[in-house]
Amino acid sequence: MSAVDPLESLKKGQDLTVPALVLRITPYRDSDIIAHILTPSLGKLSVLARHARGSRKRFPSSLDLFDRGSARLTRERNGAFGLKEFTPSHSLKRVRDDLDKLTLASLLCETFDLLLHEESGDNSQQVFEILDLSLNAIDEASDLKGCLRAVYVALSSLTRHAGIIDLADAPPGSKALATLLDAIERFTERRLATRSTLGPMLKKIAAS
């Protein structure tokens, strides 16, 4: 028996609830949000969350960056994806309370958002798990070195998955991380907005 295509359920007008990670949020109109979310079955999606900045019942966390939880999806009349409800399972509190952790988690989400294609389900389960585990590793890390190690592992896996560069045999470190980020920027032809904050962090580690 063949597996049911989740997109077919949405095309038939049925809601679909899936695990999701919030990669990016953009305020839209008075109270709406356009969010980029990563799901294990549908890959990355752009979704419109109507009244997300005003409904605590449907969006208890107001739909924030790094949120991990259950997303109830629907199809808008114009064919776009709508997000009717998002229930967070955990919110990475230590990441939100620590500037270094917040910056590194933002770097990960920015990179995944840039490199992943919309509605591509190829290996999306694996990619979802890489990001989910890495964000949790940053949240739980006891020091900055542990946070940077989690970022390196995630970006190394993502760039290998995307066919950009394979550093599987390279020892982790600041040089290897810089090589990964250089390759990502060449591939996307744009500068990562969060990269400029890495320099002070690496100096902090070298001085410790």
Image: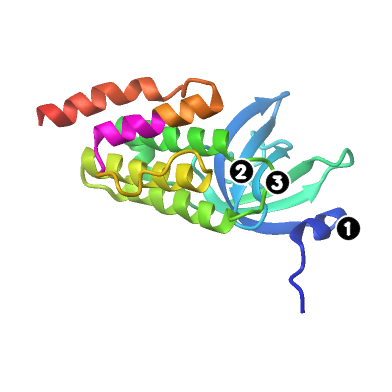
Please name the colour scheme applied to the rendered image.
rainbow
Residue topped by disc 1 = 12
The residue under the point 67% across, 32% down is 33
Tell me if 118 is positioned left or right of 191 in this view: right
Residue type for callout 3:
Glu
| Residue 50 location (% of width, % of height) | 74, 37
The residue under the point 49% across, 34% down is 111
Tell me if 108 is positioned left or right of 100 in this view: right
Query: Which mark is drawn over residue 37?
Result: 2
Query: Which mark is drawn over residue 186?
Result: none
Which residue sits furthest bottom? 1
Quick one: SS at disc 1?
loop
| Residue 44 location (% of width, % of height) | 63, 44
Q: Quadrant of residue 151?
A: top left
What crowding class fits label 2: few (fewer than 14 Cα within 10 Å), some (14-19), or many (20 or more)? many
Residue topped by disc 3 = 119
Depth-wise, is mark 1 or mark 3 nearer the camera?
3
- Above or below: residue 4 compared with residue 82: below
The residue under the point 17% across, 31% down is 205
Quick one: SS at disc 3?
loop
Spatial CA span between label 1 and label 2: 22 Å
What crowding class fits label 3: few (fewer than 14 Cα within 10 Å), some (14-19), or many (20 or more)? some
Quick one: SS at disc 2?
strand
Depth-wise, is mark 3 or mark 2 nearer the camera?
3
Tell me if 166 is positioned left or right of 122 in this view: left
Residue 46 in view: yes
